[in-house]
Amino acid sequence: MGDEVSGKGAAVVMRDRKTGKRRNLEEEAKQKQEEDGKMAQRQEKYSKWGRGYVHAIDITVRGHQGLISVRLLS
């Protein structure tokens, strides 16, 4: 039996366990990377809300007002 018939030296084929279809690992990695990017953006957005979005803005405004008053006094 020849190498071509037996599959010796052939590329590995990854298949889905449920459907038996071939998996495209490059495409799956690309999709995973896109999903991770979207998830990171969502987490960044909601992390601001978790601390209190209005409270964070209030602190920033107070900080700027403090700098302005220090400059006026100097």
Image (cartoon, grey):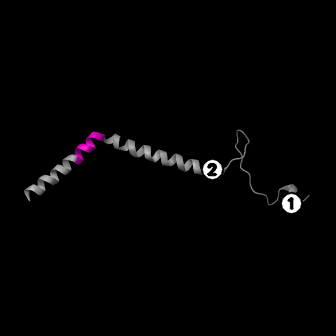
Amino acid type, callout 1 = Asp
User: Dot 1: within a 10 Å radius of its alpha carbon, few (fewer than 14), some, or many (20 or more) residues?
Assistant: few
Residue located at (26% from left, 41% from top): 55
> Tag 1's secondary structure?
helix
State the separation of the CA atoms marked 2 and 1. Answer: 30 Å
Q: Is residue 69 magenta?
A: no
Specify the quadrant of the image occupied by residue 48: top left
Q: In what quadrant of the picture does the C terminus appear?
A: bottom left
- For residue 47, the mark is none
39 relative position to 3: left or right = left
Magenta segment main secondary structure: helix
Image depth: mark 2 or mark 1 in front: 2
The residue that appears at 58% across and 47% down in the rendered structure is: 31
At which x and y percent is residue 52? 30, 40
Q: Quadrant of residue 57?
A: top left
Residue 13 percent coordinates (x, y)? 74, 51
3 relative position to 42: left or right: right
Amino acid of disc 2: Glu
Instruction: Give the residue number, with chain letter if any, for mark 1.
Output: 3
The residue at the point 9 percent across, 55 percent down is: 72
Q: Judge whether 21 appears above or below 2 on screen.
A: above
Instruction: Give the magenta part as a residue range.
Output: 53-60
**Where's residue 45, x and y in %?**
39, 43
Q: Helix, strand or loop at disc 2?
A: helix
Categorize mark 2 by other alpha carbons within 10 Å: few (<14), some (14-19), many (20+). few
Residue 30 x/y as whole percent: 58, 51
* Label drawn at residue 27: 2
